[in-house]
Amino acid sequence: MATAAAAAAPLADAHHEELSFIRKYIFSTDHKIIGIQFLFASLAFLVLGGVLAILLRWQLGFPGEELPGVGTVAPKFYNSLVTMHGTFMVFFAVMPLLVGVYANYLIPLKIGAPDMAFPRLNMLSFWMFIQSGIVMTASLFVEGGAAGSGWTAYAPLSAVPQYTGASLGQQLWILSIVLFGASSLLGSVNYITTVINMRAPGMTLFRMPLSVWALFITAIIALLAIPIIAAAVIMLFFDLTLGTTFFLPADGGQPLLWQHLFWFFGHPEVYILILPAMGIISDVIANGSRKPVFGYHSMVLAIIAIAFLGWITWGHHMFQSGMNPLLGTSFMISTMAIAVPSAIKVFNWLGTMWRGNIRFHTPMLWAIGFVSLFTVGGLSGIFMASNAVDIFIHDTYFIVAHIHYVLFGGSLMAIFAAVYFWFPKMFGRMMSETWGKIHFVLTFIFYNLTFFPMHILGMAGHMRRIYDPTQYEFLQPYQPMNRFITISAILLFVVQLPFIVNFFWSLFRGKKADINPWQDNGLEWTVPSPPPHGNFAMTPTVYRGPYEFSVPGAEADYMPQSVPPSGSQ
Amino acid sequence: MDWLPGAASSYAADLDRIFYVILAITGLIFVGVQVALVYFIIKYRGRKGRQASYVEGSTKAEVIWTVIPAVIIVGIAVASQTVWSEIKDPNHFPTDALEVNVEARQFAWAFTYPGADGELGTDDDYIRYNQMHVPVNRPVVFNLTSVDVVHSFFVPAFRIKQDAVPGMNLRAWFEATEVGEYELACAELCGVAHGLMKGKIIVLSEDEFQSWAAEQS
């Protein structure tokens, strides 16, 4: 008896002790639970961001008319809508959906680690994110309204309460961004450390899936970029509340300093929002095509090149800002240079599908949608990279079309691909493929009907962020198009319903998922769905890269990374 | 169909040309990528008994699709730079231009004209609000500033956009080539009535402009 108890003790130790509900699901340090917490929270913010978008689109399509059940949109509220839609979508939807959810969930599982390097820091990161989200949401309801200076918060508009009429709203916006930044920094430190230190034996850097590469590089960008925005918004807070004049010209401050600081953060931020999407897409396209990623090494180099170039292109947001025109030339050149690695990525995705044996599962459809729509966003970027053409299209709907093709057509398509792809691993059940495909087709159609016409509005000179386009004679002929866009946007919002229903229905009623439903090679597909706390019963050994599909002579058309080569028993 | 609004300034055609060149190039690439995507979807759709080819990449192909985009963007950049410096580089601004001060504020435009002596900053200067009268076929150089927040001077028909920044005096120019009225808009979010911060550029023949100017002082 005594020996049996002694023998059992280390085993019980190795297996994690039974945790209370609160420790297991609320204040959890398990990277998988934290990833799932981020998923629920940021999907909720995605819905909120969508509601704000519908409200502001209503005003643009039907200026001054009453939205049934809501009322009319006042000009001041309209500016808050513009500001908060951008803020929620960038900071509380797309960024946490990519980084908070998938860096957390995937990195340890994909590199063969039991958890993050710093699990408690990870938990803190999530709860600071929740705090920042609560503060930002609360700012919608305070006296004076939410911040109304745009998600870019250009000073002096944002620095003097009288200029927008929002005082507390702008302060809470800043506070929330600071909290968000702290959360993001904690996450980044964790992801970087985990990737560097905790890879399983055999998982060399160049055997890492591109999703992990992209999330790793993204974490480095975030680690370097977040302190800049934090410093900038704290300076802005001092201007707002303490009477400093960092950005106010009256006492020697510089409005352009804000723009430089904001975009020095803001442009790398754009790549935080797209690089993980590119990584995820690469994984899904290889799986769907049953082929290795075309040019794996150049895909890695392209990620690094984009990340590096992202630091020297911020001035293209400021071509018309009044900075020296010579800078307009240098920023055009660095910006144009990004077209090269971006083109490599698109062509290599096509190369991956070429001569494949493509399975059109739901995640693959979203990945194909990504390639199609990201191409549009990439190409429209060339227009504004041209400093000359930018003189005309800067601050028009052409820019609005561009960012939505990159962040919705790009990032959000990749997010949906990821949700459908890893749902079985996360929850142990499959989502409905039929409804997933219906969701994709309807989203793809209404997405394009909403955002493609915005290019045409932009070419007509339609300014962004204006309250009522019909005030301008030259825009009056385009009002039917504005109305069309608004109706399409409402429908785009409505067709997300199948996703929400599918998600929650599958959570409880979905078909039980196998260990490896997509027949993929990643290490996460070698553990049960959902994986237990600690992930791997035994640390896996990695024998090959992640994309060994359709290897000639092999029995199956996939070859998991941790299966030993045959003949080397 | 013209995608861009009717052009009415001396450099509008130059800017439009680059726009349409980029539209043609990107349009071709767009069609090429989408056609390839659809073709691959149909041709390489999964079927039983077929296997994907094990291809890890092709250095040759990758060099081709690295070099070609690089060459294209260098071409676009060179062409853009010429027009950029024509419009924005103060060293290339036309001389013997009419000089006007433009002051933006929430939510109006103020135009200060030099008066009979042709000099700004003297007693006979006069100010007009939200309407800028200019002569046709004569360059207008304006000194742009703002008293409160960042605004942006945007005349779609002239293809000119320049931010007005408080604390900075920025110079910009245009030369209207057709008599008529053109809308001026603020293009940078500037507060509650940003969408109503509009003005008119009224382009007059030289004679009409002279008589208008004589009436003002």
Image (cartoon, rainbow, N blue to C red):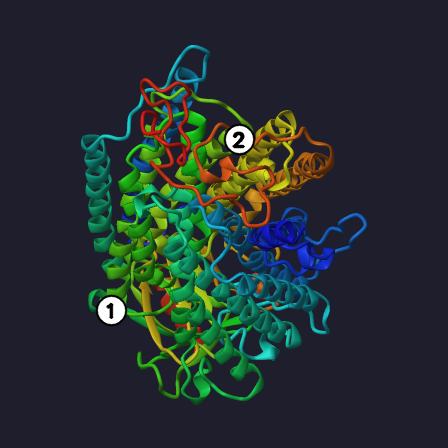
* Other-residue count near label 1 (Cα within 10 Å), few / some / many at <14 / 14–19 / ≥20: some
Q: Nearer the viewer, residue A477 or B114?
A: A477
- Give x and y (percent) for residue A461: 46, 50
- Give the foreground label among 1 and 2: 2
Q: In percent of the image, x 46 and y 39: which residue is there?
A: A523
Residue assigned mark 1: B90
* SS label for mark 1: helix
Q: In which chain is the residue bearing label 1?
A: B
- Give x and y (percent) for residue B137: 30, 58
* Other-residue count near label 2 (Cα within 10 Å), few / some / many at <14 / 14–19 / ≥20: some
User: In this rendering, does residue B53 appear at all?
Assistant: yes
Q: In percent of the image, x 64 and y 46: which residue is there?
A: A61
Q: Nearer the viewer, residue A528 or B206?
A: A528
Residue A535's place in the image compared with A514, above or below, is below
Residue A190's place in the image compared with A402, above or below, is below
Residue B11's place in the image compared with B197, above or below, is above
Residue assigned mark 2: A516
Whether pointer 1 and pointer 2 mark residues with C-beta atoms closer than 8 Å, the reply is: no
* SS label for mark 2: loop
Q: Nearer the viewer, residue A170 or A278?
A: A278
Q: Is residue A41 left or right of residue A464?
A: right
Which residue type carries mark 2? Asn
